Image (cartoon, rainbow, N blue to C red):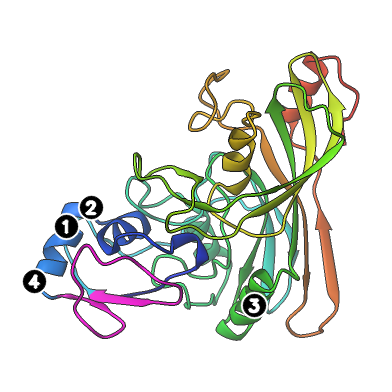
Amino acid sequence: MPRIKLKVDEDNVGIRIDSYLAENTPLSRTAIQKLIENGEVFLNGNVPNKKVKTELDDIVEFEYEEKTLTDIKPQDIPLDIVYEDEDLIVINKPKGLVVHPAVGNPDGTIVNALLYHCKELSDINGYYRPGIVHRIDKDTSGLLVCAKNNEVHNFLSEQLKDKTCYRKYYAIVNGVIENNEGEINAPIGRSEKNRQQMCVTSKNSKEAITLFRVLERYNDSTLLDVELKTGRTHQIRVHMQYINHAVVNDSRYAKKVIDDSGQFLHAYFLSFIHPRTKERMEFKTRMPQYMRDYIISKGGTYLD
């Protein structure tokens, strides 16, 4: 029987504990609530009420075993490896691939692939997220760095917190943005109307800053170079919706979509200080073909 241990990160602050566990383990919310009612879930060593909301660095633990909760198995899923050494691995995630197991996605994830490829991974983020330092949405493609041990994991996490880890994205958004560049500084929290969505709000929110620069304009959309100064869940998608320029094909935040293949968002640039050598490392990937095809269809020329 595995012991589930999770540490609450900045993206999961202010969420009811039952919702948090339902979103970060393969268990349903109902199953989680029963565990809490039975006193089998511990928050910082104490049994919580199911309505208690998470705080940064909370430790949530429980032991449980049933047919719907299975061990995470290594799977031979191809990885586009950009860089790898004894401490970490940088991969270029395709869109459509989930980062870690959760409700509705018990396997076929980046974690399953990492367990097959790597002998060791960090375990700071719990049983279901070995090696995972930061995440990318299922339907966003791009660069992801994963840790092979806890020391490296902590070092990289600190860089995310103190903003010395730099991440840039290509985003194609709806509408023509007139300003050549801009900054969106608006706090993001979980929507009270739909817990699956984030929104700009003053309630239970965190600082969120997004910088953007126009690369090319089309008749009804704009290609942006976007830099994250903070790392909130769905940050770019929420901020672009907030300024009425939702990411193209974003089924959650845009009013209209082309199809169900996901938003036009790619994490093309990643830079951090290597935990062992202390040298700054930079990685860059090309714009994915689905975004290039869209640009060509609009008569654009910026093809990375």
Check residue 31 in the rendering and tell me which mark sits there, or answer none. 1
Q: Main secondary structure of the magenta part?
A: loop
Q: Of tags 3 and 1, which is closer to the observer?
A: 3
The residue pinned by badge 3 equals: 158
> Where is residue 64, by image quadrant?
bottom left
Quick check: 65 left or right of 290? left
> Could you give the CA–CA distance between mark 4 and mark 3, rounded to whole angstroms?
36 Å
**Residue at (50% x, 60% y) in the render:** 11
Q: Is residue 224 magenta?
A: no
Residue type beneath disc 1 = Ala
Q: Is residue 173 above or below residue 139?
A: above
> Could you give the CA–CA distance between mark 4 and mark 1, rounded to whole angstroms?
11 Å
Q: Position of residue 176 (x, y in %)?
A: 77, 22
What is the span of residues highlighted in magenta in the rendered image? 40-62
Image quarter where the C terminus lies is top right
Q: Secondary structure at mark 4?
A: loop
Which is more toward the observer, 224 or 106? Answer: 224
> Could you give the CA–CA distance between mark 2 and mark 3, rounded to whole angstroms?
31 Å
Q: Is residue 47 magenta?
A: yes
Residue type beneath disc 3 = Glu
Q: Secondary structure at mark 3?
A: helix
The mark that comes first in sequence, 2 or 4, is 2
Q: Secondary structure at mark 2?
A: loop
Q: Is residue 39 above or below residue 182?
A: below
The mark that comes first in sequence, 4 or 1, is 1
Check residue 38 in the rendering and tell me which mark sits there, or answer none. 4
Q: Of tags 2 and 3, which is closer to the observer?
A: 3
The mark that comes first in sequence, 4 or 3, is 4
Which is more toward the observer, 75 or 55? Answer: 55
The residue pinned by badge 2 equals: 28
Residues tagged 1 and 2 counted as in contact (Cβ below 8 A): yes
